[in-house]
Image (spheres, rainbow, N blue to C red):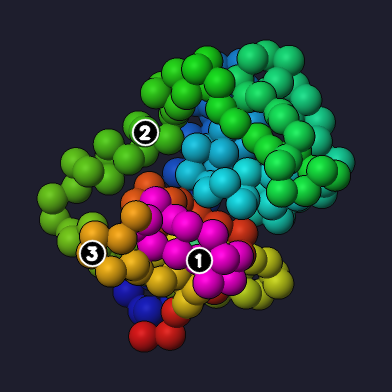
Amino acid sequence: MSHTSLAVEAAQLIDRLDRLVRSGESEHGLNPVQWEALRYIARANRFSRTPAALADYLGSTRGTVSQSLISLEEKGFIARTQSARDKRSVDLELTTHGRSALDVDPLTNLAADFAATRTLNLETVVGLLRDTLTRAIARNGGKQFGVCRTCKHFQKTPTGATNFARCTLLDEPLSKDDSAAICVEQEAATV
Ligand code: SF4
């Protein structure tokens, strides 16, 4: 099979996998956007758990995201509180109910199917998917939302220092957990 034919089949397979995951999502009383919002809030750092950042992440409008968040709050999955950093914004947090929902996230079935694959190096697969996602986001003019520790503003502090690391852009301390979270401000460090 040619390189182009393989690329087309890869796109079709990803599309089909996406549809299968989404068909399982409705069984839990949440729509796909609401699931994505819960996953995002679980993965994002404290600077990024806002409705505006979520809209950027989903490539959606703020109005659509706002409706989803209102519904998630009414169903008890998330809490919204006034942001301490910006009084015009709110911070989003998962409730216990929201965290429990993620324990049965239909996406975990897809992860288990990947884990069951023994014939391929998963690091290679993840690298390929990351590269493809980076190109798709760049084409759409979106933000990357990369992991904090890969950001050019991430500065590891010396061993024995109070904080694990520091953000030189926002001038804020970062914990080890922060370093693994995704961020709306992330800019990939050049290797
Ligand atoms: S180091 Fe980069 S990714 Fe981490 S908090 Fe700062 S801007 Fe965000």
- Tell me how far mark 2 sits from mark 1, CA to CA: 31 Å
Q: Nearer the viewer, mark 2 or mark 3?
A: 3
* Element marked by disc 1: strand
Provide residue 145's location: percent of width, then percent of height. 55, 60
Label 3 is placed on what type of residue?
Thr
* Element marked by disc 3: loop
Stretch of the chain drawn in magenta: 163-175
Location of the C terminus (image quadrant): bottom left
Sequence order check: which comes first, mark 3 or mark 1?
3
Residue 167, disc: 1
Front in this rendered view, residue 117 or 64: 64
Query: Around disc 1, counting alpha carbons within 10 Å, would you say few (fewer than 14), some (14 to 19), or many (20 or more)?
Result: some
Location of the N terminus (image quadrant): bottom left
Q: Nearer the viewer, mark 3 or mark 1?
A: 3
Q: Which residue is mark 3?
A: 159
Q: Quadrant of residue 34?
A: top right
Label 2 is placed on what type of residue?
Thr
In this rendering, position of residue 134 left or right of residue 69? left
Residue at image coords 56%, 39%: 41
Residue 119, disc: none
Residue 108, disc: 2
Sequence order check: which comes first, mark 2 or mark 3?
2
Mark 2 in CB contact with mark 3 (< 8 angstroms):
no
Label 1 is placed on what type of residue?
Cys
* Element marked by disc 2: helix
